Every structure is written in C-alpha cells, then in structure tokens.
Amino acid sequence: MKRYLLLTCLLLGACSSLPLAIKNPPLHDISYAQAVQQIANYKDAPVRWGGVIIDVENEQNFSLVQVLYYPLGSNARPQTDQPNEGRFLIKSPEFLDPAIYTGNTKITVAGILTGDVERTIGNKVLRLPLVAATTIHLWTDYVYDDYYDYYGGFGYGYGYSPYYRGYPYYWGNYYWPTYRPFTRSPFRSR
C-alpha cells in the first residue's frame, strides 16, 4: 500500500508544468521598485519578475525581450489587474521566436539582475533593469467560450431553448452526458 501511495505522489508531483525556479521565489525577493531605485546595490542578485511582453529583439548571440512589469500573484502569474510599475529587459542566450513570444503575452522570468540598459522609448531615454534569464515561463490565457448559454441551450443568443439540449444536464442528483450540439435538431420537423 505504501508503494502505491509513493507512486501516486510522484506521479502527481510530475504533473506540475511550472518550473521550480518560477514556482519558488528567491530567498531575498527583490521588488522592481527597489531595483530601479538602487540598481548598483542589487547587481548579481536573483530575481523573479513577470509582466506582459512588449517587444522581442533577436541579436546574433542572444535575444532581448522588453516586458511591462506587473506584480506576481501567489502562483507566480503576472497580475495585470494591478497597476504596472515600469519596464525591464530579459536577456536570453537562446533564440526566442517573435511568433511565440508575441506582444501582450504574460511572462514570468527567473534570473540574475545584471544591471541596467539605456533604451529610447518614443522621445524619452530610459534606463531599464536587465535580467539574465535562467528560466522563462509563458502563460496561456483561457478564453471563455460562450457556446452554452445560461438556460442549457446553446449558442442561439436568446437564452432559452424549447428542447433541453444542455451539456451536461442535471437529472436526479446526477450529471448525465448528452450528445454534442449541432445545427439542426432531430426533434424538429424537417
């Protein structure tokens, strides 16, 4: 029995797709505001930051990702409902494809704060913190599918279906699967 319990725990632990460097914050977690105010004091310090991708620049030996910083939640996901605090750059020795690292994609990075870099944004010159990435995690957004409406019908927009075709439907303390919706009902005359 103990063997099966251990095997179950190992399998469930392997199901987590979040890298450990992203899941666990550094021992001395440095905030973005601290780093911007005194960048020299925090050089070579480990950080775990996140935000939304603005731009990707690929050079010959490295890639730079410009990120709009947002504070991280308890699951290390950027909280875009909070106010942003500024921008920072991620430097990766690997090629980061701009088709994958697209704008407005949420990203979390774990790495080393190596200093700052001067960038021109519009007509303003800014000094942006530079993080040498050890681990990068892209977040996928879940899209709400409004296929089923609130009365159990599907996709007609008027909220009521004369034939109950919801999936799954509730009957007698159980949820029963039904057939997938289709465009023409078998209950209607042809």
Image (tube, rainbow, N blue to C red):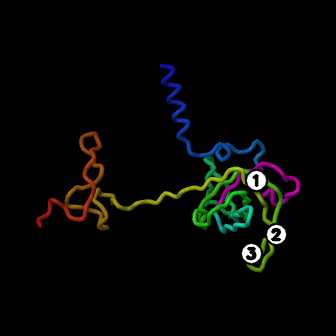
Q: Does the segment drawn in magenta span residue 21?
A: no
| Inter-mark Cα distance, 1 to 3 | 23 Å
Percent x, y of residue 3: 51, 21
- Say which quarter of the image contains residue 85: bottom right
Cβ atoms at labels 1 and 3 below 8 Å apart: no
Within 10 angstroms of label 3, few (less than 14), some, or many (20 or more) residues?
few
| Residue at image mark 1 | 31
Question: Along the line of sight, which residue is nearer the eye, 128 or 146?
Answer: 128
Q: Which residues are magenta?
A: 30-51
Question: Along the line of sight, which residue is nearer the eye, 157 or 124?
Answer: 124
Percent x, y of residue 91: 74, 59
Cβ atoms at labels 1 and 2 below 8 Å apart: no
Percent x, y of residue 141: 52, 58
Residue 67 is labelled as: none
Name the kind of residue labelled 1 in the image. Ser
Name the kind of residue labelled 3 in the image. Ile
Percent x, y of residue 39: 85, 58
Sequence-first tag of 1 and 2: 1
| Residue at image mark 3 | 121
Within 10 angstroms of label 2, few (less than 14), some, or many (20 or more) residues?
few
| Residue at image mark 2 | 118
